[in-house]
Amino acid sequence: MPMIDHESWPEDAAVPIFIAGNVKEAQRVERALDDAGLDFSIQAEKYETAFSLIFGSYDGVAFHVLESETDRAVQALRDAGVKIRVVDDPGDKSKD
């Protein structure tokens, strides 16, 4: 599926599912979403880690999918072995 221009989706239709911190990670996520047949968009975004208290926030690439495809997208990332910086993982019960 093609990467879609983030601005072309209706407001609030796309939700962030992952923030990649480097090119290799972004390519892995892009491949997983593409292989799953999901439309997605990317957008530059700041993110924080435990080191952000010292070094500040980092630049990353946020991957967005349609809200209705969130579960499928998260599963595609899990199947590809991508587990870090998943945003609002619906399968993560530790936040409950």
Image: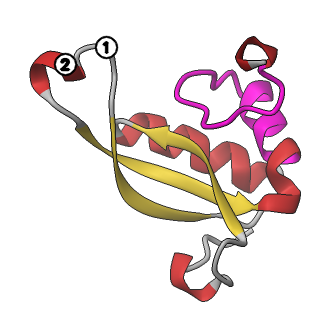
Q: What's the CA distance linking mark 2 and mark 1?
A: 7 Å
Magenta part of the chain: 72-92
Q: Which residue is mark 1?
A: 50
For the point 75% across and 68% down, which residue is it?
Answer: 1
- Colouring scheme applied when the structure was drawn: secondary structure
Residue 60 image offset from top left, x and y in percent:
34, 45
Q: Amino acid at mark 2?
A: Leu
Q: Quadrant of residue 95?
A: top right
Q: SS class of the residue under badge 1?
A: loop
Q: Main secondary structure of the magenta part?
A: loop
Q: Nearer the viewer, residue 4 or 19?
A: 19
For the point 63% across and 21% down, which residue is it?
Answer: 83
Q: Amino acid at mark 1?
A: Ala
Q: Which residue is mark 2?
A: 53
As drawn, 44 above or below 1? above
Residue 49 image offset from top left, x and y in percent:
34, 21
Discs 2, 1 touching: Cβ within 8 Å: yes
Q: Quadrant of residue 3?
A: bottom right
